[in-house]
């Protein structure tokens, strides 16, 4: 029996099971709607919740105790899987679409900067409204859980870290430890909800506003054909040495911190740095003997693999938190995070599509970037059947990160 439990709780087994079930769920169509590769999040949530719940109930000395301890210690699957597959996805998709990033800025100017900043600002407005209208006098949720909820809804680790630092300027001693715990609670509850909201909204917005994704895709492809072509550099074969070099450069870039005075500091983080490095180097094309333009089909297979694994790991790692928050004391924070992100996304869509006249293919990526959500980008790629949302994501995401850091710093001054 112990041997069977050991297999069933094996991290690799759980990942592949979540992928298989997720892709099966993704094939289910309701009208023209399907989850595609995003189905892995939902299968992962179910499996992750069941695995963690089982492990929590196993007592020392019972059969499977060592396996249960491993599940609890790793969070079902190791965070290294989360980080590695996210990086693999970002470096390969960045290299695939980087050649078009120059034309994106030429055509759209600062529109994606506006989208990238707008979403965090609108989300903070909703956060403040929720705090003053519902949380402030509840005696249950303080300003510390609230800013943690904001960071989680924005799926922004930099905002979370900044909120912890900012709390140190407000309280000290034992009160700081309590405040930090509250911020972490809000973030933990809201982060997986933030992931689900952006994934679902990217998939559902075409239905909500009744426009055809296929028509948007055809219009965008026509727009690309009418735009002056970028400098042509012949694609080389898939080169893992060059990919690894790009990822290494990206990690260095992501760890560069820019001081912002009283607002703290800003950095892209490893994932953001990798995406930016891949987009820029792919746009440049060649540096000496290094060719950063690679076979598009091979890069497509690579990013699909990274995305598929990443989605499943996200669900597995956060499944218990999602279900537990919806069933327990974190319900208010979970509900609030839906509105914090959802309202901002809808307004950003209206501004981007109706006012800026941005095509949905590229706008969907920018909205995911405004939410700093790699799963959202994956959903946009899956829902549009195009890699082009990545360019919008790459253009908006750095400015969203900066806005999140500044807003998290200011929160305690304006709450």
Image (cartoon, helix red, strand yellow):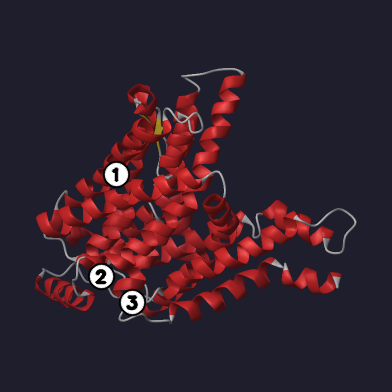
- Answer left or right for 212 relative to 55: left
Q: Quick check: marks 2 and 3 in contact, CB under 8 Å?
A: yes
Q: Where residue 29 sits: x, y (%)?
A: 38, 81
Q: Measuring 61% from the left and 75% from the top, which residue is drawn there?
A: 17
Quadrant position of residue 379: bottom left
State whether residue 302 is above or below residue 270: below
State whether residue 226 is above or below residue 133: below
**Residue marked by disc 3:** 33
Toward the right, the furthest residue is 61
Q: From where the camera sits, is residue 75 visible?
A: yes
Quadrant position of residue 264: top left
Q: Measuring 39% from the left and 55% from the top, which residue is drawn there?
A: 373
- Answer left or right for 233 relative to 27: left
Q: Where residue 378 sits: x, y (%)?
A: 39, 66
Image quadrant in which the C terminus is located: top left
**Residue marked by disc 2:** 207
Q: Tell me which numbered mark, 2 or 3, is placed earlier along the sequence.
A: 3
Q: CA distance from mark 1 to mark 3?
A: 31 Å
Q: Tell me which numbered mark, 1 or 3, is placed earlier along the sequence.
A: 3
**Residue marked by disc 1:** 399
Quadrant position of residue 152: top left
Q: Where residue 25 sits: x, y (%)?
A: 48, 78
Q: Nearer the viewer, mark 2 or mark 1?
A: 2
Question: What is the secondary structure assignment of the residue under circle 2?
Answer: helix
- Answer left or right for 399 relative to 227: right
Q: Nearer the viewer, mark 1 or mark 3?
A: 3
Q: Nearer the viewer, residue 363 or 45?
A: 45
Q: Where residue 322 sits: x, y (%)?
A: 53, 55
Q: Measuring 51% from the left and 35% from the top, which residue is drawn there?
A: 183
Question: What is the secondary structure assignment of the residue under circle 3?
Answer: loop
């Amino acid at each position: 029996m112990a041997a069977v439990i050991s297999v069933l709780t094996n991290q690799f087994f759980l990942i592949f099971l979540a992928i298989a079930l997720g892709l099966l769920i993704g094939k289910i169509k309701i009208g023209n709607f399907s989850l595609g590769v995003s189905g892995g999040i939902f299968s992962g949530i179910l499996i992750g919740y069941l695995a963690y719940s089982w492990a929590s109930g196993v007592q020392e000395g019972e059969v499977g105790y060592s396996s249960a301890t491993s599940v609890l210690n790793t969070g079902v699957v190791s965070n290294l899987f989360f980080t590695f597959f996210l990086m693999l996805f970002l470096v390969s998709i960045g290299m695939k679409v980087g050649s078009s990033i120059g034309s994106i800025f030429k055509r759209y100017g600062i529109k994606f900067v506006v989208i990238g900043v707008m979403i965090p600002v609108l989300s903070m407005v909703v956060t403040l409204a929720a705090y003053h209208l519902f949380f402030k006098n509840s005696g249950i949720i303080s300003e510390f859980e609230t800013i943690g909820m904001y960071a989680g809804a924005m799926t922004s680790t930099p905002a979370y870290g900044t909120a912890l630092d900012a709390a140190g300027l407000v309280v000290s001693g034992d009160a700081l430890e309590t405040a930090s715990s509250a911020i972490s609670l809000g973030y933990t509850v809201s982060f997986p909800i933030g992931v689900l909201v952006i994934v679902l909204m990217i998939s559902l917005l075409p239905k909500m506003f009744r426009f055809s994704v296929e028509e948007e895709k055809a219009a965008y492809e026509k727009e690309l054909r009418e735009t002056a072509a970028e400098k042509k550099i012949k694609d080389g074969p898939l080169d893992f040495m060059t990919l690894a070099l790009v990822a290494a450069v990206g990690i260095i870039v992501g760890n560069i911190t820019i001081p912002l005075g009283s607002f703290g500091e800003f950095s892209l983080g490893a994932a953001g740095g990798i995406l930016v490095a891949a987009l820029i180097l792919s746009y440049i094309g060649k540096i000496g003997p290094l060719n950063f333009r690679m076979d598009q089909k091979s890069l497509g297979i690579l990013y699909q693999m990274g995305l598929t694994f990443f989605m499943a790991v996200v669900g597995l790692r956060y499944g218990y938190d999602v279900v537990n928050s919806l069933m327990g004391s974190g319900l208010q924070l979970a509900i609030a995070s839906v509105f914090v992100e959802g309202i901002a996304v809808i307004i950003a869509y209206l501004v981007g599509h109706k006012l800026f006249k941005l095509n949905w293919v590229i706008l969907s990526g920018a909205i995911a970037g405004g939410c700093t959500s790699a799963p959202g980008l994956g959903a946009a790629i899956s829902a549009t059947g195009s890699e082009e949302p990545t360019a919008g994501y790459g253009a908006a995401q750095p400015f969203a990160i900066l806005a999140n850091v500044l807003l998290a710093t200011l929160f305690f001054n304006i709450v």
